[in-house]
Image (cartoon, rainbow, N blue to C red):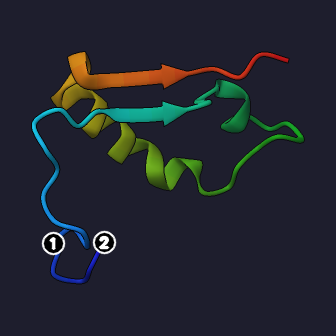
Amino acid sequence: MAKNDDLRWGSLGQNAVHICVDMQRIFAETTEWKMPWLPRVLPNIVLIAGAHPERTIFTLRSV
């Protein structure tokens, strides 16, 4: 996002969805998969998903 909080390419349309890719607890726990940035971004993911849960899609990569 730009510093003034405007979206670079304009406003989102009414049909926009939030796609949350591969959010798994393993990335937050002390494992070889831990992502150190997850605690910083997780509150924003929760806010976005909670604002419009009907327009949030969670994906999960299966191995």
User: What residue is shown at x 22% (from left), y 16% (from top)?
Assistant: 54
Q: Is residue 9 above or below residue 53?
A: below
> What residue is disc 1 on?
6
Q: Is residue 4 left or right of residue 20?
A: left
Badge 2 crowding class, 10 Å Cα cut-off, few under 14, some 14 to 19, many 20 or more, is: few
Depth check, front residue: 55 or 28: 55
Q: Residues within 10 Å of mark 1 (few under 14, many from 20)?
A: few
Numbered tag placed on residue 29 in the rendering: none
35 sits left or right of 30 in the view: left
Q: What residue is pinned by disc 2?
A: 1
| Quadrant where the image shows the N terminus | bottom left
Compared to residue 1, the image places residue 25 above or below, namely above
- The image quadrant of residue 31 is top right
Badge 2 marks a residue whose secondary structure is loop
Q: Secondary structure at mark 1?
A: loop
Which residue is drawn at the image coordinates 38% and 40% (left, top)?
45
| Residue reaching furthest to the bottom | 3
Query: Residue 30: percent from the left, percent from the top?
Result: 80, 38
Mark 2 touches mark 1? (CB < 8 Å): yes
Identify residue type, mark 1.
Asp
Looking at the rendered structure, the kind of residue marked 2 is Met
Q: Quick check: 10 left or right of 55? A: left
Q: Quadrant of the C terminus?
A: top right
* Relative to 32, 16 lies left or right: left
Give residue 33's position: percent from left, percent from top.
82, 40
Image x and y of residue 8, in percent: 25, 73
Of mark 2 and mark 1, the one earlier in the sequence is 2
Task: Please tell me which residue lies in front, 11 or 22.
Answer: 11
How much space separates mark 2 and mark 1, taking CA atoms?
7 Å
